Image (cartoon, rainbow, N blue to C red):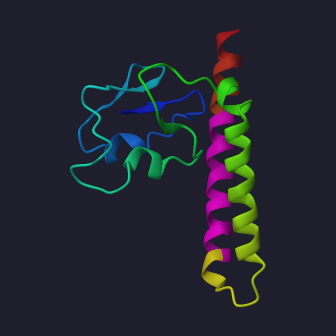
């Protein structure tokens, strides 16, 4: 089963250079994955690189060739169960007294970078809306 790019994709293009088969395509508006070329990176990696580099965590997911909408993902019980399980696990690790400062620094840098990407993406979208008026 190939991976699918969802509506949560922010267009950061991190997935394009890491795709070992060139399955990720961009049509000028949206990214999509050619299911005939996607092999889940089985030839090179143990983890699909599009999903591993996606800053949204749900922009690139295992799926079918059908489009997974943001609303379907957002309103599913499975989505929230996984989200809260991940959140609780990370918070527990951050509050562990034997916790290495490495992960706190990583989390802080990641959060800052993600915020920058999201604000840039939001600013670009707002500028495009302004220009189209």
Give the total of numbered labels. Answer: 0
Which secondary structure is most common in the magenta stretch? Answer: helix
Q: Viewed as shown, does residue 15 lie left or right of 91?
A: left
Work out whether 100 lies above or below 92. Answer: below
Image coordinates for residue 38, horizontal then vertical, percent: 29, 34
The reply to whether the magenta stretch includes residue 128 is no
Foreground: 71 or 114?
A: 71
Residue at the spot 57% in from the left edge and 46% down from the top edge: 57
Task: Report whether 24 appears left or right of 126.
Answer: left
Image: 14 above or below 74? below
Q: Residue 32 versus residue 2: which sits nearer the camera?
A: 2
Taking the spot 67% from the left edge, 59% from the top edge, the residue there is 112
Q: Which residues are magenta?
A: 104-123
In the picture shown, does residue 109 fall above or below 66? below
Q: Position of residue 79 (x, y in %)?
A: 68, 40
Placement of 45 over or under 133, stated as above or below = below
Residue at point 76%, 68% (across, down): 91
Q: Quadrant of the N terminus?
A: top left
Measured as percent of width and height from the top left, residue 75 is found at: 74, 30
Residue appearing at x 43%, y 26% in the figure:
64
Q: Quadrant of the C terminus?
A: top right
Q: Is residue 120 magenta?
A: yes
Q: Position of residue 33 (x, y in %)?
A: 37, 28
Q: Is residue 36 left or right of residue 47?
A: left
The image quadrant of residue 72 is: top right
């Amino acid at each position: 089963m190939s991976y699918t790019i969802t509506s949560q994709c922010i267009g950061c293009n991190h997935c394009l250079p890491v795709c070992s088969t060139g399955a990720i395509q961009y049509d000028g508006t949206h990214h999509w994955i050619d299911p005939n070329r996607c092999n889940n990176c089985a030839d090179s990696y143990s983890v699909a690189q599009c999903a591993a580099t996606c800053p949204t965590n749900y922009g690139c997911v295992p799926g079918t060739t059908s489009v997974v909408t943001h609303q379907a993902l957002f309103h599913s019980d499975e989505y929230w169960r996984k989200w809260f399980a991940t959140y609780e696990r990370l918070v527990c690790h951050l509050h562990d007294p034997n916790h290495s400062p490495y992960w706190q620094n990583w989390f802080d840098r990641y959060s800052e970078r993600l915020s920058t990407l999201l604000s840039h993406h939001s600013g670009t979208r707002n500028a495009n809306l302004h220009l189209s008026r």
